[in-house]
């Protein structure tokens, strides 16, 4: 990976966590996902970029983390994930919606329904 700017320590930590999303060990995957969710909005941009990773497992876990963070910046990228070539990645977006964990975010998105995003804070 080529860096185009000097990263601060927090950014390096986030990029390290994103790289760890591809780990094969379930415990590492779980802890990495939880750490990214705890970082919240500061991890959103890196997670959005991870949706383009060549590994389906990284794309899937990034989608799960973004769904749990519930930042409106992730709505359009998550909608694009619904067109992913791997069904497991698509389901990472669909299942939380079905469980209504992020359903409100999609329902209230002006980009999908023509309504405003009033219940969600723009970042």
Image: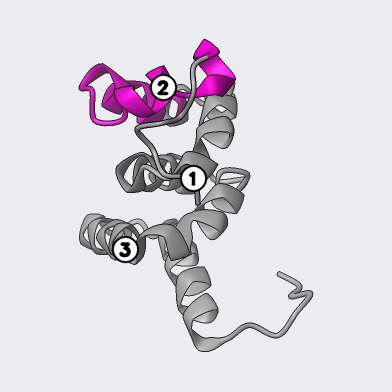
The residue to which callout 3 is attached is: 32
Measured as percent of width and height from the top left, residue 110 is found at 54, 21
Q: Is residue 123 above or below residue 83?
A: below
- Tell me if I can see residue 56 in this picture: no
Question: Of the numbered discs in the image, which one, if any, rests on residue 88?
Answer: none
Q: Does the magenta-highlighted stretch encompass residue 110?
A: yes
Q: Badge 2: how crowded within 10 Å, few (<14), some, or many (20+)?
A: some
Measured as percent of width and height from the top left, residue 89 is found at 45, 31
- Label 3, label 1: how many angstroms apart (C-alpha)? 26 Å
Asked where in the image residue 100 lies, by quadrant, the reply is top left
Q: Nearer the viewer, mark 3 or mark 2?
A: 2
Q: Does the magenta-highlighted stretch encompass residue 109?
A: yes
Q: Residue at x 57, y 86 (%)?
A: 8
> In the picture provided, is 68 more to the left or to the right than 89?
left
**SS at mark 1 in the image:** loop
Task: Report the front residue among 13 and 85.
Answer: 13
Question: Of the numbered discs in the image, which one, if any, rests on residue 122?
Answer: 1
Asked where in the image residue 37 lies, by quadrant, the reply is bottom left
Measured as percent of width and height from the top left, residue 14 is found at 47, 71
Q: Badge 3: how crowded within 10 Å, few (<14), some, or many (20+)?
A: many
- Label 1, label 2: how many angstroms apart (C-alpha)? 12 Å
The magenta stretch spans which residues? Answer: 90-114
The residue to which callout 2 is attached is: 108
Mark 1 in CB contact with mark 2 (< 8 angstroms): no
Q: Is residue 41 above or below residue 94?
A: below
Task: Report the front residue among 58 and 37.
Answer: 37
Task: Report the front residue among 93 and 72.
Answer: 72
Measured as percent of width and height from the top left, residue 70 is found at 36, 42
**Mainly helix, strand or loop, the magenta region?**
helix
């Amino acid at each position: 990976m080529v860096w185009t700017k000097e990263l601060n320590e927090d950014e390096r930590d986030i990029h390290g966590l994103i790289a760890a999303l591809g780990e094969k060990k379930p415990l590492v995957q779980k802890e990495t996902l939880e750490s990214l969710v705890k970082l919240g909005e500061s991890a959103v941009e890196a997670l959005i970029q991870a949706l383009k990773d060549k590994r389906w497992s990284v794309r899937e876990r990034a989608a799960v983390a973004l769904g749990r963070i519930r930042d409106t910046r992730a709505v359009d990228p998550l909608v694009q994930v619904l067109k992913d070539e791997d069904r497991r990645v698509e389901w990472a977006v669909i299942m939380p919606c079905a469980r209504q964990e992020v359903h409100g975010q999609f329902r209230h998105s002006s980009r999908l329904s023509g309504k405003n995003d009033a219940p969600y804070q723009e970042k």
